[in-house]
Image (cartoon, rainbow, N blue to C red):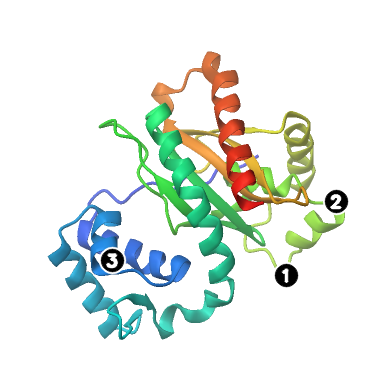
Amino acid sequence: MEKAFRTPPPYAIASVDHALRAAAMLQLEGGLTVSQMAERLGVARSTAHRLLAMLVYRDFAVQDDDRTYRAGPVLELAVHSQSRVSALRAAALPHLRRLADLLDETASLTIRTGDTVRFVASVEGAQSLRVTSREGMVFPAHHTTAGLLLLAELTPAELDDVYAVERSAERPDLPALRAELARIRRGGFVVNKERSERGLTAVGVPVRDPAGAAVAGLAVSMPSVRYDRHRLPALVSTLRSAAHELEADLA
């Protein structure tokens, strides 16, 4: 199956990255204060205030009377799903923090929309060499850990519908994908070695709602040089425990 790497730009601009992450947070979560934004981005309160002021100026954000900020007109296209995503994200964050503390690697929660997935929450590990937050980013579903987990839940007809030529921007090799998804269904987890990004390995498990349907993927990501296949059973066990705890909270 083909690979589609996403490589960070060689000259990343921190202020632009902060602004884009701030916009994604507002779209996914709704109201945030300046202090909350500063804490989430790891910047000074004055920096967060300037970022939010520029987002307001460009209609990416609006400020309410209580001085909280929320998605503005430019970002409101996805507001219809905000309450569901916000609730899922709020429930997941404590578990992601515990995973990141326990494993000292980056933990994330991802949902699928059609043939793409979106990272809705991410907590970085503390090591200097680590996978940075992908929160708010969108990837082709069949290239990502959570995407493969969630595609594996579909019936053959549903999978065909997702990758109908007129709907999918990137159509994979469907016979090969079906075979891979069958293996994932049997195992119940995914190991993604450098499929979405060069030098990155991730392991993930599904998160299910009370009816048993997979609603998200829970994953831990690390530099490939630090991945040890002998640790895989322990990683999967830890992820499954966290997923079950999150499922209990959602129920």
Type of the residue with mark 3: Ala
Q: Which residue carries the number 3 mark?
A: 19
Foreground mark, 1 or 3, reads 3
In this rendering, the label closer to the viewer, 1 or 2: 2
Which structural element holds mark 1?
Answer: loop
Residue at 46% x, 42% y: name it.
96
The N terminus lies in quadrant:
top right
Residue wearing tag 1? 166
Mark 2 surroundings within 10 Å by alpha-carbon count, few (fewer than 14), some (14 through 19), many (20 or more): few
> Could you tell me residue 90's position as x and y percent?
48, 56
- Which residue position is annotated with label 2? 156
Q: CA distance from mark 1 to mark 3?
A: 33 Å
Which image quadrant is residue 181 in? top right
Q: Is residue 26 left or right of residue 34?
A: right
Crowding at dot 1, Cα within 10 Å, few <14 / some 14-19 / many 20+, comes out as: few
Q: Give the Cα distance between marks 3 and 2.
A: 40 Å
Indicate the position of residue 114 as horizontal and vertical percent values: 67, 62
Name which quarter of the figure residue 80 lies in.
bottom right
Contact check, label 1 and label 3, Cβ < 8 Å = no
Gap between marks 1 and 2, in whole Å? Answer: 18 Å
User: Which sits earlier in the primary sequence, circle 1 or circle 3?
Assistant: 3
Q: Earlier in the sequence, mark 1 or mark 2?
A: 2
Q: Amino acid at mark 1?
A: Glu
Amino acid under disc 2? Pro
